[in-house]
Amino acid sequence: MSGATILPQANNSSDQVRTTATHHRLSTYLEESLCLASRLLELELFLLALAIGIQDAISFPDFHCFASNQTGNTVLFAVGVLLDDPSGGEPPMFAISTLAVSLSFFIIGVFVTGQIANRLAISQTRGWLFFSGLGQTVLVIIAGALQLRYSELVGPNTKLGRIIIGLLAFSSGSQVAVVRGLKITDITTAMATAAYIDIFIDPRLFAGFTENRGRNRRVVFLLMLVLGSFVGAGIGKAANLGVGVLVSGGIKTVVSVMFLFNSKEDNEEEK
């Protein structure tokens, strides 16, 4: 009888040990810093650039502003403030409140995401890239669902429009902050101007294909951003613009899962 009572206790203890070991392995795995020279990581960032291109292409027709291109939004904001004359009887060129929402939520997304990563020193870890990517994806999918379901209520100067662009801008700012934390400056996933400049002032611009990885990264990044813009515009022409947002969210979902399969920092096989 005493043996019968001891056996379950032993089994429970063994199960607890296995559970603790599993949790430890999972925690260690998620805390690993990723190999920044990985080709897989490059592919993931290119796909994120594709997603951003889609978002900006579908946000401008509906909201007359961008989700991630805050240079453009800053210029449009100034133009709207100084050149739109409500007393003239003509409709405003741009919705100042919507532009302000996009600018503000993008900055908040960058600030919150960047500072969390800084404080916890997790900017290059597998778990951070995975969970922050999922968080961004949730915001994008919510925005796409709202835009798809209530398309008749979406406009450049509507409450729902400001909610949607706020979600997209926060997600875009968060994505940019996460990518900047990787310190791969050739692939920002969002801002094209610096990439254009860096390509054409590169003293090794005409080096062989395998001899200038930075140039190759910038070129592919720009191509993916442009491709995303065409994809987003094409979806908007053929269907509801909300579909484009959901496609972008789908891409971000795939990338977030892909982060779980990257090699860690001390693994040289993908360099």
Image: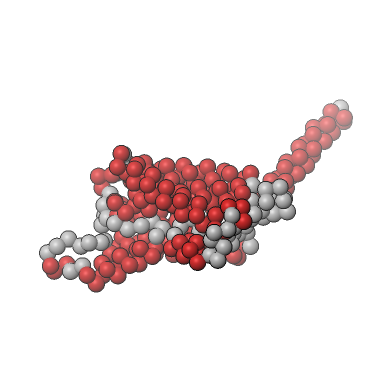
Q: Position of residue 259 (x, y in %)?
A: 60, 47
| Residue displayed at 59% across by 65% down | 118
Left or right of 238 in this view: 50: right
- Quarter location, residue 88: bottom left
x 72%, y 42%: residue:
22
Quadrant (top left/top right/bottom left/bottom right) for the N terminus: top right
Q: Residue furthest bottom?
A: 82
Which colour style is shown? secondary structure
Quarter occupied by residue 114: bottom right
Looking at the picture, how far across and down is residue 177, in whole percent? 52, 61
Q: Nearer the viewer, residue 12 or 159?
A: 159
| Number of marks present in the image shown | 0
Q: Is residue 238 above or below residue 100?
A: above
Residue located at (60% from left, 65% from top): 119
Report the side of 110 relative to 30 (left or right).
Answer: left
Instruction: Where is residue 23? Give x, y as percent.
Output: 70, 45
